[in-house]
Image (cartoon, grey):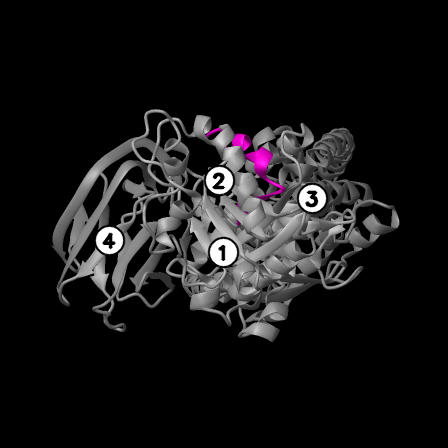
């Protein structure tokens, strides 16, 4: 891993070379990853953005009556609308659920085709009619197979489906497990303990024979909570009265309808709250008018009946003054009765907790008392504020509690004031009745019949005036309701922001897939390098040993034995010549005997020994190649030679030998001029003893006199001690490291031997190096390929 860093910084040049060496990784990775990204992006649902906007008139609209004007002047009440509260109401689960009910989306329909699921909003080929009062199943996918225009098959299964009653929005304790499948007819009720519905065929839409259909029953409350999570409401800009509604979804028509329905419900709710006072006033006026109408009809019938029965003439002039006084006294009493009844009605409402909780206090109709009017308006305003806060989210409970406390204070003030007013009216009533008694004494002196007529006419006149007054007030209340407009209106109906989806971001997906396609091979290369424990190139070799490098021999292929003969113009042949040249720089007189060894088998020491020996011979030097691996000789794989060799020569001088071998008899000439070979001979059980014998020492002395170069192919260091026995004859040891095979711990072994001076004058050769995977390839190939 350290080769990736140079001077404590990332060596980009080395990384680039490693990437070039594994170019085929990228050829495989890029098309596969990009194809997977394309399939992934194609399978994702397209999500689009939708917006709508409403404007809120923060000053309440509508005419201001004198009571409201007085209320504002005295500092009571607030006609402003809090935008933050309105946002809370608009985004509340309650309002969203009402909008969903209006759209009738308690059932969702889906179509599955080519592994892609699409929601069918108002365009499914069938429609489900639930018995909303009966139990249904939540969390179940009802699969529908349309067999014909008359028949279908319904099937579903579940391990734990819960019961659900749509009307009550109630999840029951009922749990259903199992599988269900039934063939049924369109239009016929389907009833079980857990399924109560009727499925009808929607002839407007054709059935796709390649698709599968299913539907689910939704819990509107849970749907509303989910929708609240994705709904964003914010002012168009800071301080703006325009609220922008934003949402996202896969079904454009459904999302647009949902936003429009939400705005409609919000406006309806605003108008409903605004008209609460007017409706209560109208209801009170109608009740009073009904009673006034009955009283007027009774007094009219009594007057006409009495005149008809008695056949009376008109009232005399002398009675006019007395009758006028009597009439005024009665009018005063009647007016006081109306006021007294009204205040007693107010008192009963204030003292009744149930009516008070439901805000049943009507607005004033004929009361000109500013104080009472102010208190009533304050209470109505506080109640409307309480309703608004209760609808919104539970984050403002402290404000809600404060509003309730203020309502109790106002109620106590109203109780005290109404009680005082009733006491005052009682005093005035006793005084008026006293005056009426005095007037009646005066009229008693008039003829009896005339007195009766006077009373009946006065009563009729009073009832008529009262009726006309209440009728006028009723018309005023109806007109006020009729012309009332909401404080909120739609600025822009819901629309899709763009035809381009906001998700998935295909450009980002493809960009990330490209990065992954590039990153995976790079990561694989780096990881391979991190876990690699084998020498792969010159840099890694020099990093793990301080032993000088004698040369690099390229890979020549398994079938090539003697490269300089079989492939003389290849890159491998040139590396062998270069290694021989490097060895030529050494003192020929002191570096005659060169031993080849390695850590383990199959690292190419024999290949290197044969080819380096061939290179010396072709360079005009008399060279002898000795196979000193008496346990596992392999030189016979390179040359067509006899078996007699070194072991036979060394054994022939022992007392038990039956044949003596001369040096000439165990040295064989090759087809390569100047290259002789001494084979290993027969395999023996005691090679170390033979190689350490005096005869071996004499042999090496004689051979040095005959040849310029002696190349010895020795056993691997890691297996036996034979090499250490031979090392005393060697002027130079070449330790063979095979690329991508020799492990780092093998270099640690030779390093330790050199440090302990058990081996002297050691150099390494990097063998079987594939230049096509190296940054040095261009140089070598440029001159010799």
Q: With 755 as the anchor, is 287 left or right in this view?
A: left
Q: Quadrant of the N terminus?
A: top right
Q: Are marks 4 and 2 in contact (CB under 8 Å)?
A: no
x 47%, y 64%: residue: 673
The residue carrying mark 1 is 99
C-alpha gap between disc 3 and disc 2: 103 Å
Q: Earlier in the sequence, mark 3 or mark 2?
A: 3
Q: With 236 as the anchor, is 638 left or right in this view?
A: left
For the residues carrying marks 4 and 3, which lies nearer the camera in this image?
4
Q: Earlier in the sequence, mark 4 or mark 1?
A: 1
For the residues carrying marks 2 and 1, which lies nearer the camera in this image?
2
The residue carrying mark 4 is 143
Q: Are marks 4 and 3 in contact (CB under 8 Å)?
A: no
For the residues carrying marks 4 and 1, which lies nearer the camera in this image?
4
The residue carrying mark 2 is 714
Q: Earlier in the sequence, mark 2 or mark 1?
A: 1
Front residue of 657/502: it is 657
Q: Magenta span covers which residues?
A: 720-738
x 19%, y 52%: residue: 154
x 40%, y 31%: residue: 653
Q: Residues within 10 Å of mark 1 (few under 14, many from 20)?
A: many
């Amino acid at each position: 891993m350290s080769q990736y860093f140079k001077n404590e910084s990332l060596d980009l040049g080395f990384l680039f070379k490693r990437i070039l060496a594994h170019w085929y990784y990228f050829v495989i990775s890029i098309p596969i990853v990009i194809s997977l990204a394309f399939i992934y992006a194609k399978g994702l649902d397209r999500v689009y953005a939708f917006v709508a906007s409403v404007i809120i008139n923060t000053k309440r609209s509508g005419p201001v009556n004198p009571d409201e004007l007085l209320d504002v002047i005295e500092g009571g009440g607030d006609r402003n609308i809090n935008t933050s509260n309105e946002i809370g109401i608009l985004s509340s689960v309650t309002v969203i659920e009402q909008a969903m009910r209006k759209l009738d989306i308690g059932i969702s329909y889906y179509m599955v085709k080519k592994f892609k699921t699409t929601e069918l909003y108002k365009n499914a080929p069938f429609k489900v009619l639930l018995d909303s009062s009966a139990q249904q199943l939540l969390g179940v996918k009802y699969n529908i197979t349309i067999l014909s225009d008359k028949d279908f098959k319904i099937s579903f299964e579940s391990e734990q489906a819960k019961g659900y009653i749509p009307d009550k929005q109630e999840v029951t304790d009922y749990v259903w497990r199992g599988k269900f499948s039934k063939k049924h007819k369109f239009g016929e009720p389907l009833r079980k303990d857990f399924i109560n519905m009727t499925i009808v065929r929607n002839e407007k839409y054709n059935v796709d024979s390649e698709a599968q259909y299913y539907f689910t029953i939704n819990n509107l409350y849970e749907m509303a909570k989910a929708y609240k999570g994705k709904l964003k409401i914010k002012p168009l800009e800071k301080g703006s009265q325009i609220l922008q509604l934003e949402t996202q979804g896969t079904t454009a028509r459904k999302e647009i309808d949902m936003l429009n329905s939400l705005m409609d419900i919000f406006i309806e709710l605003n108008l409903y709250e605004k008209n609460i006072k007017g409706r209560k006033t109208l209801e009170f006026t109608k009740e009073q008018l009904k009673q006034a109408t009955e009283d007027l009809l009774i007094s009219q019938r009594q007057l006409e009946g009495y005149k008809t029965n008695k056949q009376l003439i008109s009232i005399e002039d002398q009675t006019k003054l007395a009758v006028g006084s009597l009439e005024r006294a009665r009018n005063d009493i009647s007016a006081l009765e109306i006021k007294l009844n009204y205040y007693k009605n107010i008192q009963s409402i204030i003292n009744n907790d149930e009516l008070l909780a439901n805000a049943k206090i009507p607005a004033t109709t004929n009361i000109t008392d500013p104080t009472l009017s102010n208190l009533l308006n304050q209470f109505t305003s506080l109640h409307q504020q309480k309703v608004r806060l209760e609808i919104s989210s539970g984050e403002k409970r402290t404000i809600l509690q404060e509003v309730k406390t203020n309502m109790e204070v106002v109620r106590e003030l109203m109780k005290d004031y109404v009680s005082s007013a009733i006491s005052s009216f009682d005093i005035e009533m006793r005084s008026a009745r006293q005056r009426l008694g005095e007037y009646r004494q005066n009229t008693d002196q008039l003829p009896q019949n005339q007195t009766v007529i006077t009373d009946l006419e006065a009563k009729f006149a009073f009832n008529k005036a009262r009726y006309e007054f209440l009728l006028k007030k009723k018309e005023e209340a109806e007109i006020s309701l009729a012309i009332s407009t909401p404080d909120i209106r739609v600025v822009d109906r819901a629309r899709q922001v763009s035809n381009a989806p906001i998700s998935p971001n295909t450009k980002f997906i493809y960009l990330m897939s490209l990065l992954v396609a590039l990153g995976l091979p790079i990561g694989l290369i780096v990881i391979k390098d991190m876990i690699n424990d084998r020498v792969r190139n010159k840099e890694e070799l020099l990093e793990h040993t301080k032993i000088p490098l004698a040369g690099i021999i390229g890979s020549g292929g398994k079938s090539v034995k003697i490269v300089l003969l079989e492939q003389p113009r290849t890159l491998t042949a040139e590396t062998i010549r270069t290694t021989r040249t490097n060895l030529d720089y050494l003192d020929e007189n002191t570096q005659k005997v060169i031993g080849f060894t390695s850590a383990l088998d199959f690292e190419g020491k024999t290949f290197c020994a044969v080819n380096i020996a061939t290179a010396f011979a072709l360079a005009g030097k008399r060279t002898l190649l000795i196979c000193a691996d008496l346990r596992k000789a392999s030189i016979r794989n390179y040359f067509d030679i006899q078996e007699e060799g070194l072991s036979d020569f060394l054994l022939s001088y022992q007392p038990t030998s039956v044949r003596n071998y001369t040096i000439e008899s165990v040295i064989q000439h090759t087809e390569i001029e100047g290259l002789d070979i001494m084979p290993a001979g027969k395999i023996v059980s005691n090679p170390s003893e033979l190689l350490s014998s005096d005869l071996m020492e004499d042999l090496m002395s004689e051979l040095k006199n005959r040849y310029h170069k002696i190349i010895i192919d020795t056993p691997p260091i890691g297996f036996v001690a034979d090499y250490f026995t031979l090392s005393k004859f060697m002027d130079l040891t070449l330790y063979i490291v095979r690329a991508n095979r020799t492990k780092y711990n093998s270099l640690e072994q030779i390093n330790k031997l050199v440090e302990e001076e058990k081996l002297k004058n050691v150099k390494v050769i990097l063998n079987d190096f594939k230049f096509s995977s190296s940054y040095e390839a261009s140089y070598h190939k440029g001159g010799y390929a």
